[in-house]
Every structure is written in structure tokens, then in C-alpha cells.
Amino acid sequence: MRSDTPGGMTGGATDGLPSGAASGEGSDEPARERILEAAARLFAALGYDGTSTRLIAEAAGLNVATVAYHVGGKRDLYLAVMERAHRAERAALERALADFTPDAAGVHRLVDRYLDFCVERPEIPALWMHRWLSDAADIAHLESRYVRPLLDEIGERVRGAVGDDVDVDFAVATVIWCTHGFGTGGVLDAEGRRRGLDDPRAVARFRAHLHRLVAAMLRLPE
Amino acid sequence: MRSDTPGGMTGGATDGLPSGAASGEGSDEPARERILEAAARLFAALGYDGTSTRLIAEAAGLNVATVAYHVGGKRDLYLAVMERAHRAERAALERALADFTPDAAGVHRLVDRYLDFCVERPEIPALWMHRWLSDAADIAHLESRYVRPLLDEIGERVRGAVGDDVDVDFAVATVIWCTHGFGTGGVLDAEGRRRGLDDPRAVARFRAHLHRLVAAMLRLPE
DNA sequence: CCCTCTCCATCAAACGATTGACCGGTGCAC
DNA sequence: GTGCACCGGTCAATCGTTTGATGGAGAGGG
């Protein structure tokens, strides 16, 4: 019964380190890397239920059994993908928070950084959007463990930069809702086509809109 | 080949009337009604791929074959659900647009009506969110046929109520992104719980936020 | 040098379960 | 008896998962 698949993370209470204890490092990373990247792309595009393990394996150029050998079951793979997605997001935001200044320019810079991150990693808004629509109990811990501390830190920082008569929680949520909405589906242009993160002109328009939005919500100068 | 399933809508170019030509009315509506309601609830909660026809049948208290007998295949059922969801949404918005006045009060009233509609039919934001994340070509026509005209009409009305230096398209998109985001996942409160459309206090807070947002975006008095 | 032996990554094949779709039949109302 | 609403049973396909086998890289002994 599930004897020796490495990188299993089957318990759910493990610390989530991708490479386990019984391996040096680096040897099995290319395959695992390819699997995680392909899975992230497919989960973002098709959702969890819409993505089959065989499709992931094909996208990674491997056999189904090899995928299971490296990352365990499908749910383990999904958790690893989400964990890695959030790790990247947290890293980007911590870098942005490092040179945060408690004024209007600092807030606008923070918004810019997050939008830049979404442009650079367009699969991540889709991953979070899919996860946002699912309330499966066994993946809900991602939220309490990762999303909450991050939102709290951002909220705390921003709160120090604005008056105390504004609703920072809803402002942060609004930025996320809009950015993820734009990042996943884009906006309908005059011809009815959806233009999103892959269209620099659409991104520029959305960026300007987002800055106006933030300035208005937080009563900051644009 | 697919000889006599009523309400088929198999072509895709049909006009989409649920009850076909060869029936008076009312006789088969209870079962079909139950099926469509159960399917809407399940598609909203689990997504298209996460919902099985057997689950829908069980929720409707019918056999799988009976579901197929009434609504055809799974894709037909999904299209019927989406069409009905949009029909309800369009009806609500047309009712709201009927007494629209081209001023700040009119815009705020419009926003209120849409939020009321989402509170009343909380499965609809989830249905649209799931559809928003999917770009399957065979259901994309829903967007060009339904969403676009509605957005165009709203945009046109609102444009007459505000100055011409505001980006109405992005403003409408923002209201939708935020309302659907709040409607599907709610916001995290101090205890880390998600509070959404089922919590009147959370709705009231979101409503106030939305009005501030709209006033700021459209440069209207609150 | 060659021959074993042991890992390890990979694969084809198959597992039971579930999926969407379909066929034939049943009971009831008119 | 005719038509309609409905159901049990079955189909091929696909799902996630597992098994057993293969091949190559390295270690060690001769």
C-alpha cells in the first residue's frame, strides 16, 4: 500500500518540503520540475476536475506512472502546485513590501508590483480563481496558512499609509478581485474579443484603472 | 441518432426556447424544472467537470435516463442552465434599467438592484465565474450573444449619466468582478471565516463599499 | 578489463471505479 | 391501445492508481 513513492506529502500535516529526507538534491528535479510546471499550466487552464493525470503526464513528456512516482497522487500534485504558486506570490510580495513606504507612492508601487507579478506568471491568478470557487475542506488549509497572513501584512502596512476612515480589507480584496478577474478573462474590447494579461495595451489600460481605483478607495492622490 | 429527446437544443443555432413545438405546456415542466434547478446548484458549486449527471439526477430525485430524456446530454443541460441563468439576469437588469435615471441616484440604484439579484440568486455569480474561467469554444457563444449586448446597454445608459472622462467599460467590469468575487467567496473576516451573500451584515458592508467604489470611479457624489 | 549486483527512473499494461450515453421495458393515463 | 414519463441495466470510454518489467548508471570483486 503506497510503499515507496518519494515526495508523497500524503499526510497533509507534513511541512510541505518538496524534496523529502532520503535524497541529496538535484537529481530528480528536472522531471519533477517539468511535472509541476505542466500541472500548473493545465490546472490553471482547465481546473482540477478538468485536468487528467494522463494529460499532465503527456504535457510533461512522461508516463502516467512516472508522474505518480515523483509527486504521488493527483491531489498531492495539486497541493504541491498550489503551494509552489503561493510561494512565488509570497516571495514577490515580500520583495515588494521590502521597499514599501507608508505613503501614496508606496501603495501605488505595491499595486504595480502585484500586477507585474501577474503579468509575469499569468497562470497564478487562474489557479487562485479556481481555488476560490472551490470550498473543498481538504485544501482549505491553504487559505488559513498562506492567504491570511499575507493579507494581514498587506492590510497592516497599507493601513499605516492612509487615514483610518477607509476600509482597507475591502480595498485589498477589490484589488485582488479585479486583478484576478482581468488576469483570467481580460476585458471585452470594442470587437468583443477578450484582451488580458498577454496584451500590453490592455494591461496598461487596466493598470491606469487600478491606480485610479486604489487612489479613490484609500483617498490617496493619484 | 438522437431521435426523440425533447428540449434538445442540439444544433446550437436554434433559438433556445426550452419547450419545443410539439407540446402544449406545463405537463413536463415540474420534472424539467427540478432538473434545471438541481443542475444549476451543482454546476455552481462543483463546476461543469466536477458535476456528474448521476449526481444531478439524484439531487432532482430522478433516474439518470430520465434526466437525459428531458434535457438531452450533459452539455445540453449545461447550456440550458446557463441560458436560463442569463435569462433571469437579463430580466432583472431590464427591470432595473426600466426606471433608470441618468444621474447619480440612478446609477446607485442600478448597482443596488444587481447586488439584490445576486443575493436572491447566489448560484448565478458562481455559474458565471466558472464560465468566466472556461474558454471552451462550444459555449463561448453565450458571451457574444448575451453578455455583450447587456454590457453595451448598461454602459450606454451609464455613460449618459456621468462625465465623458471616465472609463465606463472598466467601471462596469469592476462592479461585476467585485460582486462575483464577493458572491462566490465572500471576504475573510477577523476570524478567518469567509462571509458572503448568505450573511446580511457582510452584504451590507460590501454594498457600502461598492457604492463608494462606483461613486469614485464615475466621479459621482456618494 | 569484465561480470554482477543494486539502485533508480521510466514505461506498458492493467486494475477497479466512474463517467456520459443509450437501449429496452414498465406502468399509468386517456 | 397508444403515448408518455420513467427506470434498470448495459455500453465503451476514461478516470486515478497500481503493478511488474526494462534499461541504464554506478559500485565492487575478480
Image: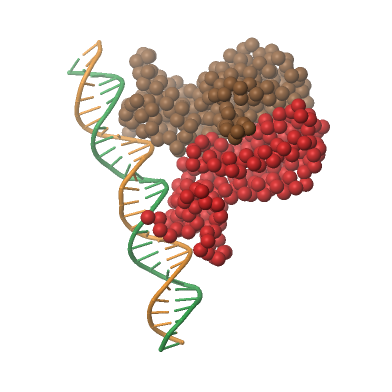
Chain colours: A red, B brown, C orange, D green
From this view, report whether residue A91 is shown above or below residue B102.
below
* Residue displayed at 68% across by 22% down: B208
Give whichever of B165, A113 is nearer the camera. A113
Q: Quadrant of the N terminus of chain A?
A: bottom left
Is residue B27 or residue B137 the one in the foreground?
B27
Residue A163 locus on image (x, y percent): 78, 30
Residue B165: horizontal and vertical position, in percent?
Answer: 78, 26
Q: Is residue B47 left or right of residue B105?
A: left
Q: Is residue A46 above or below residue B26?
A: below
Picture quarter containing residue A106?
top right
- Give the image location of residue C15, x and y in percent: 31, 52
The reply to whether residue B19 is visible in this rendering is yes
Q: Residue at x 55, y 55 (%)?
A: A18
Q: Position of residue B71 (x, y in %)?
A: 38, 26
- Residue drawn at x 50%, y 57% as measured from the top left: A7
Q: Is residue B145 in view from this perspective?
A: no
* Quadrant in the rendering for residue B35: top left
B195 and B173: which is toward the camera: B195
- Residue at image position (60%, 47%) is A85
Q: Quadrant of the C terminus of chain A?
A: top right
**Tally of numbered discs:** 0
A207 on left or right of B177: right
